[in-house]
């Protein structure tokens, strides 16, 4: 728990994100790296993708529909995984994981 909190939750500033988005970002960061998870979030939010969550990224989270943002973010994550050579071997599991995260996030979006 301490490692997840220190190395992922805090670095991604998940406590400052809407709950559904924090779940999606945390899971992405754990599996594909903090920088990539943040940069892809910033790309979805259409803010400069510098890999650091600051006020502009946090503010953009509240300026767009949450459900749409989460869906686009998870779609971007899946697109990234599909682009990997190892997708043919691990893709089924990765896709299932993203679908589970998607269900959790949908429940949090209401």
Image (cartoon, rainbow, N blue to C red):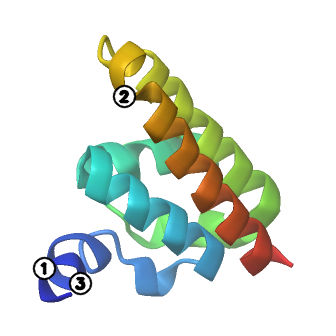
- The structure residue drawn at horizontal position 21% and vertical position 87%, both measured from the top left corner, is 1
Answer with left or right where residue 57 lies relative to residue 50.
Answer: right
Q: Position of residue 92 (x, y in %)?
A: 50, 31
Q: Specify few, some or many for label 1: CA neighbours under 10 Å numbering under 14, 14-19, or 20 or more.
A: few
Q: Which residue is mark 2?
A: 90
Marks 1/3: CA–CA distance = 5 Å
Q: Which residue is mark 1?
A: 3
Marks 3/2: CA–CA distance = 26 Å
SS at mark 2 in the image: helix
Q: Position of residue 7 (x, y in %)?
A: 16, 72
SS at mark 3 in the image: helix
Circle nearer the N terminus (3, 2): 3
Residue nearest the viewer, comparing 52 with 94: 94
Q: Which residue is mark 3?
A: 5
- The structure residue drawn at horizontal position 55% and vertical position 37%, both measured from the top left corner, is 95
Answer with left or right where residue 33 lies relative to residue 65.
Answer: left
Task: Say above or below: 31 vs 104.
Answer: above
The answer to whether marks 1 and 3 mark residues whose Cβ atoms lie closer than 8 Å is yes
Q: Quadrant of the C terminus?
A: bottom right
Q: Specify few, some or many for label 2: CA neighbours under 10 Å numbering under 14, 14-19, or 20 or more.
A: few
Q: Position of residue 36 (x, y in %)?
A: 32, 43
């Amino acid at each position: 728990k301490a490692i997840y909190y220190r190395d992922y939750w805090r670095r991604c500033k998940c406590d400052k994100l809407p709950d559904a988005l924090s779940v999606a970002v945390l899971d992405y960061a754990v599996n594909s790296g903090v920088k990539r998870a943040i940069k892809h979030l910033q790309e979805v939010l259409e803010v400069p993708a510098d890999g650091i969550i600051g006020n502009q990224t946090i503010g953009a989270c509240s300026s767009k529909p949450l459900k749409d943002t989460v869906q686009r973010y998870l779609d971007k994550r899946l697109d990234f995984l599909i682009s990997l050579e190892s997708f043919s071997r691990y893709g089924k599991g990765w896709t299932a994981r993203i679908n589970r995260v998607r269900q959790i996030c949908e429940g949090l979006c209401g």
